[in-house]
Image (cartoon, rainbow, N blue to C red):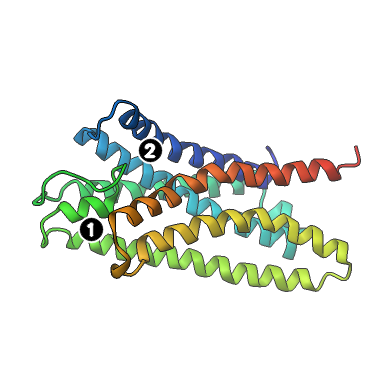
Amino acid sequence: LHMPMFFFLLNLALTDLGMICTIVPKAMHNSLWDTTTISYTGCAAQVFFFAFFMSAELSLLTIMCYDRYVSICKPLHYGTLLGSRACAHMAAAAWATGFLYSLMHTANTFSLPLCHGNALGQFFCEIPQILKLSCSKSYLREFGLIVFSISLLFGCFLFIVVTYVQIFRAVLRIPSEQGRHKAFSTCLPHLAVLSLFLSTGFFAYLKPPSMTSPSLDLTLSVLYSVVPPALNPLIYSLRNQELKACDPS
């Protein structure tokens, strides 16, 4: 766990656990007891912690992309660029970013007056569903925050794409096939987790309005909120088993 990649994996596991614990227990309680209610305070807490863990996870996945870049493209500087202090600072920045992001969204969302009742069309409190209940002229501030969030998300996505282009160029210059395979295999779990996280999130929030329906929205919410954090440990555990199988000791 003192290695940078495993240190970031530990933080990623904490965000996955946090997302699951924020949504699933209440959903299971409502299902088992055949209820569909949640308190106002509980809804605000759910929005805050879900946004917190989601944004922290995106930040950590971006940092892990930088970790792969340094390990493959600048291996001689790996210990210098990703020392224990640098890793701690990057992880702290990811958690702080998540906290500030969720605090802004939660405070702004729950300051809006609700003009269309209090029934949400989801199994958990989700910001877009809450905005549908607000007055038509009162969600402009939240809309501005969402545009700002999408800009940050696009910036992270662009950074990841540019970084992996550099990684693949460096890997293709490796002369031995075994070296190329080893370099690619270190990136595949991160790419799988990243693709699952971004693709479900992008499709859930940026799908065309013509595709909106209650059943589709519910399915997409499960896909991006529950499936990625549930599958991330499986993806990385398979990679760890592969490493153990290759260990000559």
Mark 2 or 1: the one toward you: 2
The amino acid beneath tag 2 is Ile
- According to the image, label 1 marks what residue? 142
- Tag 2–tag 1 contact (CB < 8 Å): no
Q: Residue at x 76, y 41 (%)?
A: 241
**Residue 243 in picture, x, y percent from top left:** 79, 45
Give the quarter of the figure containing the N terminus: top right
Dividing the picture into quadrants, the one containing residue 139 is: bottom left
- According to the image, label 2 marks what residue? 23
On residue 181, the disc is none
Give the quarter of the figure containing the C terminus: top right
Residue found at the very far top of the displayed protein: 33
The amino acid beneath tag 1 is Glu
Answer left or right for 99 relative to 160: left
Residue 22 showing in the rendered view: yes
Q: Secondary structure at mark 1?
A: helix
Residue 74 showing in the rendered view: no
Q: Residues within 10 Å of mark 2 (few under 14, many from 20)?
A: many
Answer left or right for 116 relative to 61: left
Q: How many marks?
A: 2
Q: In this orientation, which residue lies closer to the viewer: 72 or 232?
A: 232
Answer left or right for 205 relative to 76: left
**Residue 56 in picture, x, y percent from top left:** 46, 48
CA–CA distance in space, label 2 to label 1? 22 Å
Dividing the picture into quadrants, the one containing residue 42 is: top left
Q: Earlier in the sequence, mark 2 or mark 1?
A: 2
Answer left or right for 80 relative to 247: left
Q: Residues within 10 Å of mark 1 (few under 14, many from 20)?
A: many
The relative height of residue 191 versus residue 176 in the rendered view (above or below) is above
**Residue 51 in picture, x, y percent from top left:** 37, 47
